[in-house]
Image (cartoon, rainbow, N blue to C red):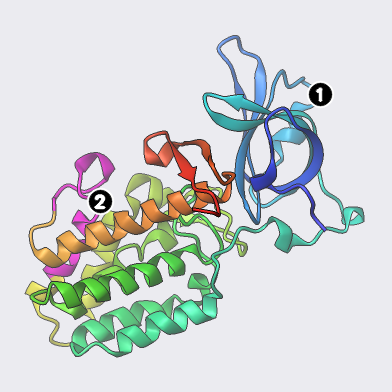
Amino acid sequence: MKENYVKDLKVDEKYTEFYMVKAVGVKSDTNGKKYLDILLGDSTGEITAKKWDVSAEEAPALEELEAGDIVKVKGIITDWKGQRQVRIEKIRKSTEADELNVADYVKAAPEAPEEMYTYIHEKVESFKDEQLKELALMFLDGEKERLMYYPAASKNHHAELGGLLYHIKRMLMSGERLCEVYQDLNRDLVLCGVVLHDMEKLNEIESNEYGVSPGYSFEGQLLGHIVQGVREIERMTSQISGFPREKAIMLEHMILSHHYEPEFGSPKKPMFPEAELLHYLDILDARMFDFEEAMLKAEPGDFSDKIFTLDNRRVYKHTEEF
């Protein structure tokens, strides 16, 4: 049974423990010295780690490490610009003799993938618009196997087993409620946009069966899920008899604009209300996820480490007596 979890690590603490590799690379500093840059994780979170001054003898073994490997690490927790980091003294790959339970090292969404998938599927089944229903079900039914484990990102928000389903489900829950407030919105169009907005994350990023992503695919690096998504909507709607061109273009626009700004991949800002709402549903769920993760690592009455995705803010966790 694992004892030292990422969420519990304290600065200046020395320890020896097993963690899963989330990302890894042997790099060179400005002086040409090699060092190991690695992201470690378990079921409670992730932490960056460095092994400085990698020798020529150590380099070959370290260069063979890859995402999904479980490694034994001996090191000390340091503070680097307000964030915890591991300074590694020794590291090796685990062996069968270590008798590890992989579940201790896999970060997963807090709900079962099958249950989230069923919720999303039933929500789509409730659409009154038969064409949007057929389109969304074409995606859900065709990609069910990968949706059971795929993360929504290679790192940061929802980078976990079942993360993409969890992201979609929470956005659907928020979107449906906001359609009750803003009653001029087309509910089916909003919810269909939610289901499909990140559909090409399945092909933008790579992932193993544990939801651990080593990075982006060839297409993901050159195109990205927004361009890939627009292209896929074009293909899928052309296969549905009588699918109106206006409706197809509006869905493509929702995918194209949901990151809002050119620097984040969207060449157009939303140009109708359902597209605008989709953007804010997406950013809201991502931000709430980041806050939730930060709160897990903070002590009551204290602040978290700086959170890069929250503009390096430190999140405060109130006391239980509050």
Q: Is residue 253 visible from the viewing direction of this image?
A: no
Type of amino acid under label 2? His
**In the image, is 24 to the left or to the right of 123?**
right
Residue 255 counted in the magenta span:
yes
Q: Which residues are magenta?
A: 249-269
Marks 1/2: CA–CA distance: 45 Å
- Residue at image coords 7%, 75%: 184
Choose the circle earlier in sequence order: 1 or 2.
1
Q: Is residue 63 above or below residue 239?
A: above
- Residue at image coords 72%, 59%: 104
| Mark 1: secondary structure | loop
Q: Residue furthest front?
A: 321
- The residue to which callout 2 is attached is 259
- The residue to which callout 1 is attached is 57
- Residue at image coords 36%, 59%: 285
Q: Residue furthest right?
A: 97
| Mark 2: secondary structure | loop
Q: Residue 316: percent from the left, percent from the top?
A: 47, 42
